[in-house]
Image (cartoon, grey):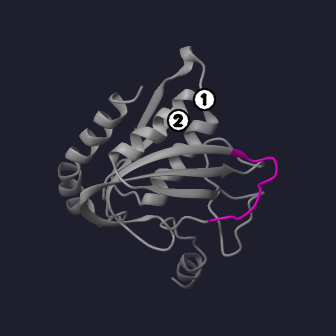
């Protein structure tokens, strides 16, 4: 038991975003648009497992480290290192669905006409906000996904014992997913 406990103490939480200021040398920066029915947190511009009746919108720029191994998320430890870890470069909360749609229009405008595709990712059960965000970044990088990437983050408890809460949250969050898809459909 002592070995197990010591191992757990050293584990990195997958519930928090790690931020870096300044340029990240040789990293691949992935921009992800987010809609969520999770409650927002401050000052880290992330979201909790608590349900929100309001749909919140944001965009994130996340760096994938140069030493990234396909299929993995290199989670930041106690001393995050952008050369080795996934790091959040920028987080921008968007005021409403109109601002979200305008941001999407701006992103689509930078793409050639035949490449204006959208990829929507919805995480599964037992996922924190950070896990869902970093997972779409990892998959987008590993699979060389083009177009605009969107993540719908419903309020999962993010724990193995939270499946009943997650089941109810998945049903609760359907309207938020529909709102995000309508905003996406209304883009130019």
Please name whichever residue, 127 or 36, is drawn nearer the observer in this view of the structure: 36
Q: Do the residues labelled 1 and 2 touch (CB within 8 Å)?
A: yes
- Percent x, y of residue 112: 60, 19
- Percent x, y of residue 83: 78, 57
Q: Magenta residues: mostly which secondary structure?
A: loop
Please name whichever residue, 18 or 139, is drawn nearer the observer in this view of the structure: 18
Q: Residue 110 carries which label?
A: 1
Q: Residue furthest top?
A: 114
Image point (52%, 44%), residue name:
32
In this rendering, would 168 be left or right of 44? Answer: left
- The magenta span reads 19-28
Q: What element carries label 2?
A: helix
Q: Quadrant of residue 24?
A: bottom right
- Is residue 163 depicted above or below 96 in this figure? below
Image point (75%, 58%), residue name:
84
- Percent x, y of residue 48: 37, 67
Q: Is any atom of residue 146 visible in this view?
A: no
Q: Is any atom of residue 159 visible in this view?
A: yes
Q: Residue 40 carries which label?
A: none
Q: Quadrant of residue 50?
A: bottom left
* Magenta-colored stretch includes residue 22: yes
């Amino acid at each position: 038991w002592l070995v197990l406990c010591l191992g757990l103490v050293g584990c990195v939480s997958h519930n928090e975003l790690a931020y870096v200021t300044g340029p990240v040398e040789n990293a691949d920066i992935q921009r992800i648009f987010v809609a969520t029915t999770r409650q927002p947190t401050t000052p880290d511009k992330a979201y909790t497992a608590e349900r929100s009746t309001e749909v919140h919108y944001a965009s994130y720029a996340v760096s994938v480290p140069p030493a990234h191994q396909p299929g993995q998320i290199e989670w930041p430890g106690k001393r995050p290192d952008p050369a080795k870890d996934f790091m959040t470069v920028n987080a921008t909360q968007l005021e409403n669905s109109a601002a979200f749609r305008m941001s999407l229009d701006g992103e689509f405008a930078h793409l050639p006409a035949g490449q204006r595709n959208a990829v929507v990712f919805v995480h599964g059960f037992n996922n924190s906000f950070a896990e869902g965000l970093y997972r779409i970044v990892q998959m987008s990088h590993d699979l060389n996904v083009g177009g605009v990437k969107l993540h719908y983050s419903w309020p999962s408890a993010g724990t193995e014992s939270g499946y009943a809460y997650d089941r109810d949250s998945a049903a609760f969050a359907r309207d938020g997913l529909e709102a995000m898809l309508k905003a996406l459909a209304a883009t130019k």
